[in-house]
Image (cartoon, grey):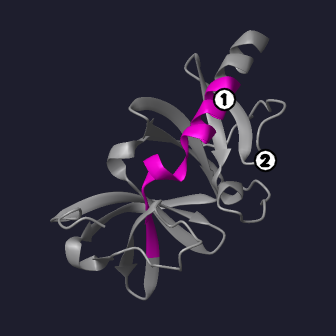
Amino acid sequence: MAEGEFSGTSQYLTFRLADEVFALDIGKVREVLDFTTVTRVPRTPDFMRGVINLRGNVVPVVDMRLKFGMSAAEKTVNTCVIITEVEVDGERVILGAMADSVQEVLDLEQGQIEPPPRIGTKLNTDFIRGMGKRDDEFIMILDLDRVFSSVDIAGLRGVDAAAMQAA
C-alpha cells in the first residue's frame, strides 16, 4: 500500500460472499441490481456466469465466489449484481460482480484501514488494497482493477462479441 493511498475518509460499498465481507471503492460502482436471468456463454471460465442486457448493452457477469475460489452458492432473494467499472491496460470495462448480498455504504477513516496481509511469496494478494476494521470484523477492501487480469478481461470481451453475434 503506497503511503497516503488512504487519506481522510473514503466510502465503500460492502458486500458479502459466504461469511466474508468485502468492499469496493464507491467510485467504481455504477449501480446494484437484483439478480436477473443471466445468459450463459459457452466455453467461458467457470467464474463467468454469462451476460445480462443492461439498457441495451451486453454486460458480462462474474460470480465473485468462484473468482475467489469459493464454492458456488444457490441464488437467494439477497443475491445481487454490482455493476462496476474496471480499468485494465488503460481501457475501461463495465462488468457485473455477482455477490451473495450487498450490505451498506460504509465510511472508513484512514486509521481504520490496515495494509493488506503478506501471506508468503507464492500467494498473490495484490488485489487487496487494505483491510478495513469495524468493531470486531475485518473488511477486505478490493482493488477491482487488479482482481481481473488482462487475460480475464480479454475473455470478457470475447463474451461480449459472442453475445452480440447470438443476438
Q: Residues within 10 Å of mark 1 (few under 14, many from 20)?
A: many
**In this view, 162 is above or below 153:** above
Principal secondary structure, stretch drawn in magenta: helix
| Residue 104 figure quarter | bottom left
**In this view, 72 is above or below 54:** below
**Residue ID at (22%, 79%):** 111
**Residue ID at (58%, 16%):** 56
- Does 135 sit left or right of 2 as displayed? right
What residue would you read off at disc 1?
52
Can residue 167 be seen by looking at this rendering?
no
Residue 62 image offset from top left, x and y in percent:
65, 44
Residue 16 image offset from top left, x and y in percent:
57, 65
Q: CA distance from mark 2 to mark 1?
A: 16 Å
Label 2 is placed on what type of residue?
Asp
**In this view, 124 is above or below 42:** below
Residue 132 image offset from top left, x and y in percent:
37, 74
Tell us which disc is closer to us: 2 or 1: 2
| Residue 45 figure quarter | top right
Q: Secondary structure at mark 2?
A: loop
Q: Residues within 10 Å of mark 2 (few under 14, many from 20)?
A: few
**Residue ID at (45%, 83%):** 137
Label 1 is placed on what type of residue?
Ile
What residue would you read off at disc 2?
46
Q: Secondary structure at mark 1?
A: strand
Residue 154 numbered mark, or none: none
For the residue pair 63 and 53, the one nearer the viewer reads as: 63
Q: Which contiguous range is marked in magenta?
A: 139-159
Residue 79 image offset from top left, x and y in percent:
66, 53
- Does 95 sit left or right of 64 as displayed? left
Residue 151 among those drawn in magenta = yes
- Does 110 sit left or right of 140 as displayed? left
